[in-house]
Amino acid sequence: MHSPVRDYLTEVLDSLADDDGGAVADYIPELAAADPDRCAIALTTVDGRTYSVGDDEVEFSIQSISKPFAYAAALADRGFEAVSATVGVEPSGEAFNELSLEGDTCRPRNPMINAGAIATHGLLVGADATEEARVDRARSFFSTLAGRELRIGEEVYRSEIDSADRNLAIAHMLRNYGIITATPHEIVDGYTRQCSVLVTARDLAMMGACLSNGGIHPTTHERVVDRRVARQVMSVMAGCGMYDGAGEWLTTVGIPAKSGVAGGLLGTLPGQCGIAVFSPRLDEHGNSVRGVAAFRRLSNDMNMHLVDAEPYGTTVLRDVVVAEDTTTFQIQGVIQFSGAEYILDALDSDDTDSPTVVFDVSGVSHFSDVGRRMVLEGMRRVRLDGRRVVLIDPDDALPDPDLGDGTYPDTAV
Ligand code: GLN
């Protein structure tokens, strides 16, 4: 069979072809030269399959989509406390290049607007890092996430740095308040190079899928960021990634996202996939017009809105089999809070009184940390009731099933 997923993406791409609204960014002269009709969509699942259509191999500068990834690197390099002393997490409701700081702390409001991103760039590596080290940290980290060596687009870098007065003004303001320590020129130069890293829609989808997958790279299986860092970055994307269009975006599309002025738009759907669209014409917020349209469609068609979750708890118990002196709970799927609660409730209302209770977890693909702790606690309590607890776990879905007191359930196959 030929998977319909790619055909669906082709259909979405075709439906965008007539939309020529918006305009390419021209405050960076090199971006004004972009072919406005280029268009690509790429989607990478958390287990590493990529579907892509259109101009999916065309390189463009990452621009502001570098911001969430630089924020992730800064959190890894400096820790949560140091980063939050420098940059906040509140939506600004302002344009991406606004010269504004929080009234009380003088921090930039969030790392997705330029002020916050310039401050975040200054945090990379360590307090005494050189500009070269910071730029290389950003470029090589992005490369690890993309799964290929990315390079800086010299033309776009030159073009932007020659007219970077506004970002320099922001950096001077930041230095005045002690938010950055290096010189404004050095920080803006490094930040501009970070924004000039060249990517394709396929690269962005893979980079996004690393976040969606809780920080584990979908194809190399390497842990590239801490789970807490991935959560923090996607949360900030959800609240601030689309600048002054963030509220509208969250209610209509509901996917944590980040846009860039070269026309890239990245969405990260936790636990499912990374999605990237590339189309250079921008709306008044600086977000890709076709990118926004594509995400609206994907979110509606594929039910991808973050808060539009399906109830899944009741799917985790395949069957409860009662034989002569044994009751077997056949557990399956991914066990998170609501699934584990469903299992515990089934144990609570089990009135068979059979002396042996079997937990068959051979159908479980993953226990979340809380799912694991809840199910082990259930086993412990069943045994406290004076019943024998047996675990069937051929694939080691529940390693080290310590029942909390150094004892283990019996095992069977
Ligand atoms: N490099 C661009 C700037 O700082 C990034 C802005 C963007 O993509 N929104 O102005």
Image (cartoon, grey):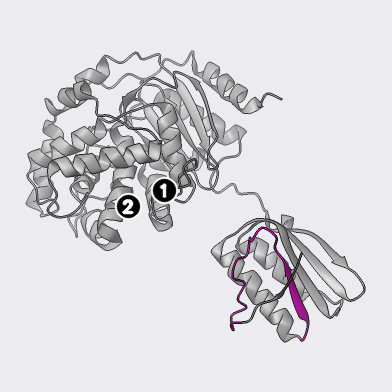
Q: Classify mark 1: helix, strand or loop.
A: helix
Q: Which of the image's four quarters has the C terminus?
A: bottom right
Q: Where residue 148 sits in the image (x, y, percent)? A: 37, 33
Q: Position of residue 158 (x, y in %)?
A: 15, 24
Quick check: can you spot residue 94? no
Residue 286 located left or right of residue 182: right
Q: Which residue is mark 2?
A: 90
Q: Is residue 308 above or below residue 388?
A: above
Q: Nearer the viewer, residue 351 or 282?
A: 351
The numbered mark at residue 234 is 1
Q: Nearer the viewer, residue 38 or 353?
A: 353
The structure residue drawn at horizontal position 59% and vertical position 80%, both measured from the top left corner, is 404
Residue type beneath disc 1: Met
Q: Which residue is painted at 28% across and 32% down in the image?
A: 63
Instruction: Identify the residue shown where x is 66% and y is 58%.
Output: 395
Residues drawn in magenta? 386-406
Ligand 1 quadrant assignment: top left
**Residue 11 visible somewhere in the drawing:** yes
Which residue is farthest right? 324
Q: Amino acid at mark 2?
A: Glu
How many other residues sit within 10 Å of disc 1, few (<14), some (14-19) or many (≥20)?
Answer: many
User: Residue at image x 13%, y 50%?
Assistant: 180
Can you give x and y, in whole percent of width and height, for residue 147 in the image?
Answer: 40, 36
Identify the secondary structure beneath mark 2: loop
Compare marks 1 and 2 and give the one earlier in the sequence.
Answer: 2
